[in-house]
C-alpha cells in the first residue's frame, strides 16, 4: 500500500476523532447519557476511526507501533459485532480519554511526513 493511502486513512481517522472530541465537549457526559443522537454520533465516528485503521498497511502500523492500532480496530469490531450489548460507559471512556491521545499521535504522524 502506498504512503499516500496511509495518509488518507490517517486523515479520515483524525477527522473522525476530532468529531468525537467536539461531541464530547458539546455537553459532557450528561448530554451523552441524555441524548441518544449524541451517543450514536460518537459511536459512528469511533467506527470510522477503527475502519480506517483496518486499512493501514502492516508495515506502516509496525513503524508507528506506539499507537495501539489493535485496540483501535478492536473497538470498531466490538461496536459492530456487539451492537446489541454496547457498554456505554466504555464508549464514553474511549471517547473522552483515549481519543484525545490518539488524535495527538495521528497529528504527530501526519506532520512527520
Image (cartoon, rainbow, N blue to C red):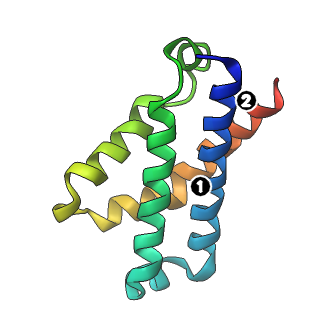
Residue 95, x across and y down, in percent: 50, 59
Q: Secondary structure at mark 2?
A: helix
- The residue at which mark 1 appears reads as 16
**Distance from the alpha carbon under mark 1 to that under mark 2:** 16 Å
Dot in front, 1 or 2:
1
Q: Nearer the viewer, residue 104 or 61?
A: 61
Identify the residue at horizontal 34%, vertical 58% (top origin): 90
Left-right relation of 72 to 89: right
Categorize mark 2 by other alpha carbons within 10 Å: few (<14), some (14-19), many (20+).
few
Q: Residue at x 68, y 42 (%)?
A: 11
Q: Is residue 93 left or right of residue 83?
A: right
Vertical order, 101 against 60 (above or below): below
Q: Position of residue 31 (x, y in %)?
A: 48, 85
Image quarter where the C terminus lies is top right
Secondary structure beneath disc 1?
helix
Instruction: Give the side of residue 13 with respect to residue 108, left or right.
Output: left
- Relative to 77, say whether 41 is above or below: below
Q: Position of residue 9 (x, y in %)?
A: 60, 36
Quickly name the residue at label 2. 109
Residue reaching furthest to the bottom? 34
Where is residue 7 shown, x and y percent of the image? 69, 31
Q: Residues within 10 Å of mark 1 (few under 14, many from 20)?
A: many
Amino acid at each position: 500500500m502506498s504512503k499516500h493511502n496511509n495518509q488518507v486513512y490517517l486523515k479520515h481517522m483524525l477527522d473522525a476523532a476530532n468529531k468525537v472530541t467536539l461531541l464530547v465537549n458539546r455537553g459532557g457526559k450528561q448530554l451523552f447519557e441524555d441524548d441518544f443522537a449524541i451517543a450514536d454520533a460518537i459511536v459512528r465516528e469511533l467506527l470510522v476511526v477503527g475502519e480506517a485503521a483496518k486499512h493501514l498497511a502492516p508495515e506502516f502500523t509496525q513503524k508507528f507501533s506506539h499507537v495501539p492500532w489493535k485496540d483501535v480496530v478492536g473497538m470498531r469490531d466490538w461496536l459492530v459485532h456487539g451492537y446489541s450489548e454496547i457498554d456505554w460507559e466504555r464508549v464514553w471512556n474511549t471517547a473522552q480519554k483515549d481519543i484525545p491521545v490518539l488524535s495527538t499521535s495521528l497529528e504527530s504522524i501526519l506532520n512527520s511526513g
